[in-house]
Image (spheres, helix red, strand yellow):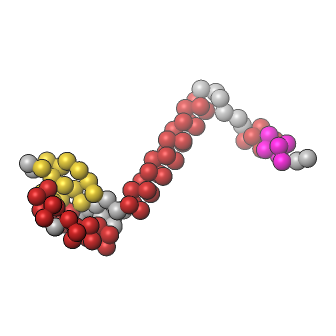
Amino acid sequence: MSRLHFDQDIQPLSDFRAGAASFIRQINETRRPIVITQRGKGVAVVVDVAEYESMQEKIELLEEVQKAEAQLSAGLGLSNSDARAQILKSIKP
C-alpha cells in the first residue's frame, strides 16, 4: 500500500458522499487509502480491495508466526532434525 498523502487522502464525510465515485477512482489509481473524517476525527478508512486482501493475508501469516513462537516457547516444537526425519518418514513408502 502506498503512503498516505495528508493533503489528498484525508476527506470529510460530506466531501466523500458528494464525490464518492471520484474518490473510489483515486483509490484504484493511486492504491492509497482515504481516511474519512467526521467532526474533524478519523472514523473510517476506504482502501482498495486488493490492498485489503493483501493486508488480511499478512495478518494471518503474522498470527501463525506468533502462534508458532508461543508453541516453541512452551517447549512444543521439534528440532530441525526431528522435523526432517518425520517428514521423510511420512513420504517414504
Across and down, in percent, residue 30 comes to: 30, 71
The answer, for residue 81, to whether it is visible in the render is no
2 shown above or below 67: below
Is residue 68 something one can see in this rendering?
yes
Left/right placement of residue 32 relative to residue 18 reads right
Determine the residue positioned at 22% across, 69% down.
Answer: 21
Q: Magenta region, mostly helix, strand or loop?
A: helix
Quarter of image, res 5 = bottom left
For image coordinates 26% across by 54% down, the residue present is: 45
**Residue appearing at x 23%, y 50% in the figure:** 44
| Side (left or right) of 76 relative to 51 | right
Residue in front for this viewpoint, 79 or 61: 61
Q: Nearer the viewer, residue 9 or 22?
A: 22
Is 24 displayed left or right of 57 in the figure? left
- Examine the structure image and report whether residue 75 is included in the region drawn in magenta: no
Against 48, is 88 above or below?
Answer: above
Q: Quadrant of residue 71?
A: top right
Looking at the picture, tell me which residue is in the foreground, 11 or 1: 11
Residue 40: image location, x then y, percent = 9, 50
Relative to 88, is 79 above or below?
above
Q: Quadrant of residue 48?
A: bottom left
> Which residues make up the magenta segment?
86-91
Left or right of residue 59: residue 30? left
Q: Residue furthest right?
A: 93
Q: Position of residue 69 (x, y in %)?
A: 56, 36
Q: Quadrant of the N terminus?
A: bottom left
